[in-house]
Image (cartoon, rainbow, N blue to C red):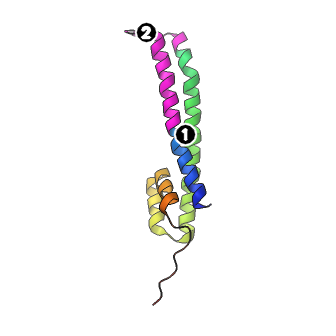
Amino acid sequence: MSKRTILFLSLGAILLGIVGAVVFAVGIGAAANCAGPGATTITQECLAQGTTPTYIAFALFGLAALLGLIGWIGGLIKTATIGAWGWFVAVLILGSLGALIYGIAGPETRAAPAAY
């Protein structure tokens, strides 16, 4: 897997997670606004208004997790293949964020051995 693919998978995961959070907030807000100010309970009709955005948000979260996992595993394989063990540990510990950082700044190929 190329660095560019790892970068795009990681970016996609992060962006889908953000979009999912916004859609989730919209769904919860729709249900809360339906009840009106000062309401202590939310009726079934109000909950129904918030369920579709909530389901969409959970689908986006799932897709973000899948993309992040693929990018993370790809980053681990790539860094292990080229022997960049410092980058391997960074990707291993930081997950999708580490894969994103590796996609931006990491090495593409194995470093040449030093001449003595």
| Secondary structure beneath label 1 | helix
Residue at which label 2 appears: 36
Instruction: From this view, report whether residue 26 is shown above or below residue 4.
Output: above
Q: Which numbered disc, 1 or 2, marks the residue that appears first in the sequence? A: 1
Q: Nearer the viewer, residue 59 or 34?
A: 34
Q: Residues within 10 Å of mark 2 (few under 14, many from 20)?
A: few
In the image, which disc is placed on residue 54?
none
Residue 36 is drawn in which quadrant? top left
Instruction: From this view, report whether residue 51 is shown above or below residue 96.
Output: above
Q: Position of residue 22 (x, y in %)?
A: 49, 31
Q: Is residue 70 something that shows in the picture?
A: yes
Q: Main secondary structure of the magenta part?
A: helix
Q: Is residue 31 magenta?
A: yes
Residue 45 is drawn in which quadrant? top right
Residue at image x 47%, y 56%? 101
Residue at which label 1 appears: 16
Check disc 1 and give the amino acid type.
Leu
Q: Position of residue 49 (x, y in %)?
A: 55, 16
Q: Which residues are magenta?
A: 18-46
Q: Residues within 10 Å of mark 1 (few under 14, many from 20)?
A: many
Q: Position of residue 83 (x, y in %)?
A: 52, 71
Quarter in which the C terminus is drawn: bottom left
Residue at image x 43%, y 10%? 41
Instruction: From this view, report whether residue 18 is shown above or below residue 1.
Output: above
Check disc 2 and give the amino acid type.
Gly
